[in-house]
Image (spheres, grey):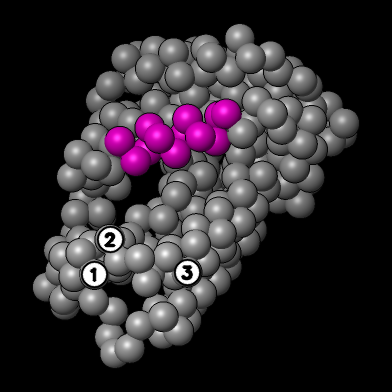
Amino acid sequence: MSSFASSDSAHHVTLEQTGLWLTKGWQDFQRAPGLSLLFGGLYPILGLGLAMILQWLDLGSLLLLAISAFMLIGPLAAICLYEIARRLERGEPLSIPQIFATVRQRSTAVGDLGLVLMMILLSWFLIGFVMFALFFTGTPPTLSAFVMDVLFNPASIPFMLASTVVGGMLATIVFTISMFAMPMLLDKDVTAAEAITFSVKAVWINRLNMIGWAGTVAIVTFLGMALAFIGLMVTFPVIAYASWHAYRDVAG
């Protein structure tokens, strides 16, 4: 692994470079389809299982909260996919034991960043429950009731606006601190604080392009979720690989 020199090493990227990240991500998926589907397939299973449990408990409306939460911990969930991309780039052997071995070597720093992301996730859940309590009486509605009585009810506009603003703020924080931090933890011998510092600076100096990239990530991820979560088997690995190439361009 490389050593960390300075957070000043972040580079500007061009619009043309950002346009190639998804293409490179798809190429990596094709180079390692088996491992990509294996790790990517874990998330549809979790998503479908969670959806079934919430529906069984008549708490289907909380599925939207859970989906947004998935977006917040995506960088942590993609850690093994980042390692696959790193090994593909360097021509190193690909095997599950080797992937886990590298992640385990960096487990302290990865765990520190993961703890930060989990704290943000917990905050989102707490804020979500508070907003439900403030805007609605009783228990959270079922998913069908939520869609008909909340999403299409003009009286629910304050709730939707508040949810969008708070969720957007948390998503922006997560994107800024982890977009380049998690890949860096696998690439260089750095602490979580150093990686976060690099990520924040890299996002800031490329802020216009990063807005477009964040929108691309959100759209592709939601497309994967829209297909009963099954699409995540492909879209999640592709986004993870593309994010690795984004990091490599920014890190130079």
Q: Amino acid at mark 1?
A: Asp
Viewed as shown, does residue 142 lie left or right of 35? left
Quadrant for the N terminus, please. Answer: top right
Q: Residue 35 appears at what percent x and percent y?
A: 30, 29
Q: Is residue 118 visible?
A: no
User: How many residues crowd mark 2 within 10 Å: few (<14), some (14–19), many (20+)?
Assistant: few
Dividing the picture into quadrants, the one containing residue 183 is top right
- Separation of marks 1 and 2 at Cα, in angstroms: 6 Å
**Mark 3 or 2, nearer chain start:** 2
Segment tinted magenta in the rendering = 212-223
Residue reaching furthest to the bottom: 138
Q: Residue at x 57, y 29 (%)?
A: 212
Q: Is residue 157 visible?
A: yes
Q: Residue 203 appears at what percent x and percent y?
A: 71, 35
Q: Which residue is mark 3?
A: 158
User: For residue 149, which numbered disc appears in the image?
Assistant: 1
Q: Residue 226 appears at what percent x and percent y?
A: 24, 42
User: For residue 16, which numbered disc appears in the image?
Assistant: none
Q: Residue at x 46, y 26 (%)?
A: 241
Q: Which residue is mark 2?
A: 152
The relative height of residue 45 versus residue 204 in the rendered view (above or below) is below
